[in-house]
Amino acid sequence: IFVFWLFTGIRREEGASLRWANVNARTRSVFLEHPQTDRQIELPRRTTVVDLLTERQDQGEWVFPAPTGKGWLRNHRRARERVIRETGIAWSPHDLRRTFASLGESLDISRWVLKTLMNHTTEHSDTTGLYVVPDLERLRDASNKIEAQYLAIVGKT
């Protein structure tokens, strides 16, 4: 799930509660409920995320299954603590979200596209943002650029 969070920039809870019903491998998209508007948004994803999800497809209803209730949080916390012990690098799931946003900004991806990819809302005080509606291909292009940069950083391009 950590790689999924890093490559998508979505919230911890959005990744942990993702159901297969919200994943379309054919269109390579993930559908998320917007936390403030209750509308569903389609977020295109590139090969690494789609491959990651495809590998997990026989896991039941949930993409990242875990014990019921707060069990998923406990399991992820233990796994994160293990990664911290093994690498010596302290981090949180929100740091993965910040990394996604920072990398996207460094690639000159527009603020509006980044906000959409991260399932953020545009503040009502930001009038210009209320008019911007990035299309699916523009979102896909931005997602592809971010993933390609991640892969270049780790030497996998």
Image (cartoon, rainbow, N blue to C red):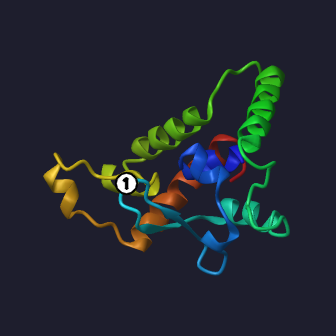
- Give percent across and percent down for residue 67: 81, 48
* 88 in relation to 79, above or below: above
The residue that appears at 69% across and 69% down in the rendered structure is 20
- Give percent across and percent down for residue 56: 81, 63
Image quarter of residue 59: bottom right
- Name the one closer to the observer, 15 or 99: 15
- Give percent across and percent down for residue 8: 57, 52
- Name the one closer to the observer, 86 or 149: 86
The residue that appears at 71% across and 41% down in the rendered structure is 70
Dot 1: what SS?
loop
Residue 73 showing in the rendered view: yes
- Among all residues in the image, which is located at the extreme front? 69
The residue that appears at 58% across and 64% down in the rendered structure is 45
Q: Amino acid at mark 1?
A: Gln
For disc 1, the marked residue is: 36
Image quarter of residue 47: bottom right
- Name the one closer to the observer, 40 or 113: 40
* 74 in relation to 142, above or below: above
- Give percent across and percent down for residue 109: 38, 52
The residue that appears at 74% across and 44% down in the rendered structure is 72
